Image: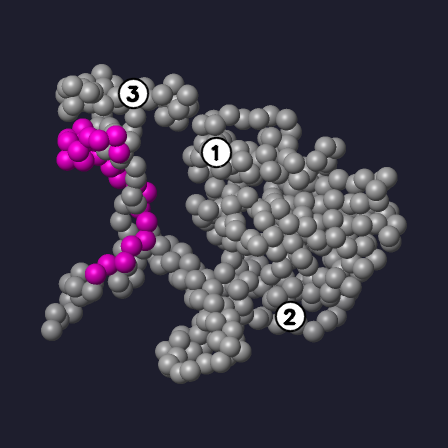
Amino acid sequence: MSGHHALIAPSSMDRTMACNAWIQLSVGLPPEPETDEAMEGNAADWVAKQYAAGNEVPYGAPIPLPGNHTVDYDMIHGAKMWVKALGYGAVSGVPVICERIHPTDCWGEPDGWRYDGIEGILRLPDYKYGFELVEVFENWQLIPYASGLIETLKLPPDTVVEFKIVQPRAHHREGPVRQWRIRADKLEPYIVRAYNAAVRALPPPGIEIAPPIAKTGPHCLHCPARVHCTTFQTGVSQVLSFASSMGRSGLNEHAVGVQLGLVQDALKLLKAQESSLEAQAESLLRSGKRVPGYGLEPGSTRLEWREGVTADEVIALGEIIRPGAPIDLRRAPGAMNARTASPVVTPTQAIKAGIDAAVIDQYAHRPHGAMKLARESVSYTRRIFGESNT
């Protein structure tokens, strides 16, 4: 089913559980561009899968995915952690159909799974590279996969389902690898809840059901429908009103907990609205329209040696700056990779090694990056739109 995503996808089941309306609100919308964090996550996932397949790609190797990433030590550390959690004999790269969640539109490809018939355990781990904490208990992404595997393999009711989250970079009180075990028959109420939410979100042909209801919450942060969801817009307005009316008063421990939860949830809603408006503003600006207070400017890039500056000149620079004890600006052989095949260090590394930044500026520069959204100063906006400075 490559190239075609299920409408009721296990990967977004947590959002479907929280808001039944998001799927129908998202129909026809263009896919959102992948963020830098998402592309880094995809790159790390590729490394983990390579290690799981027995192909230990080396540090610095280019990753054949968008984002121009190379294998780093964090990715290698996470990949080794994933291989240990996954175990031998795991199945990967095979879609699982979850008909008990939705009869026609629920399937997906888990990171891997393994059934041990002797122990009677279905192991279902999931790899998460991001910093946003993912809880393993009642994980709505893994529950649909479990339902599909239990039905496909015809596993007995006393089968133990072992869910596991492998998250190497996120700090959690239970550590980077967390698990939740539950018997297959005890999982039944969760499957029923997921089915009810999925069917309400996308009624199968011939089934009449009450229309879905949109609800706001932290799940809005990554929802593509927030661009034109009136419930979300109303929620953000209420958040802004709530924030502006905040006062200072003595709170007991219960009130502090409640208020803190409200504020943190509100911040997540505002973050979701911010990213949605940023995408709309950038699209309008690229089409030649004006967005008050905002414009496009070149993104920041890495400091690079200017064209024509040779490796010999860079090495000589370290010798000239400190004749008695030259600064070695040659790159260590083990640090070279396909992306940076230069035999010398980068300008930034040269500065860290002791070369004055003003000297480096004569040999290096920052090329213009891709245009990105940037906020303009008030005076600049007034000048563009002909407003008074008084």
Residue 388 pos. (x, y %): 13, 71
User: Label 3: which residue?
Assistant: 330
Instruction: Report the disc number at residue 212.
Output: 2
Classify 10 Å Cα crowding around label 1: few (below 14), some (14-19), many (20 and above). few
Residue 94 placement: quadrant = top right
At 72% from the left and 62% from the top, the residue drawn is 194
Instruction: Report the disc number at residue 15.
Output: none
User: Label 1: which residue?
Assistant: 73
The part of the chain drawn in magenta is 352-377
At 58% from the left and 47% from the top, the residue drawn is 176
In the picture as drawn, the residue positioned furthest to the top comes out as 312
**Disc 2/disc 1 C-alpha distance (Å):** 45 Å
Residue 258 pos. (x, y %): 52, 76
The mark nearer the N terminus, 3 or 2, is 2
* In the image, residue 241 lies in the stretch drawn in magenta: no
Q: Amino acid at mark 1?
A: Tyr
* In the image, residue 356 lies in the stretch drawn in magenta: yes
**Which of the two discs, 2 and 1, sits closer to the camera?**
1
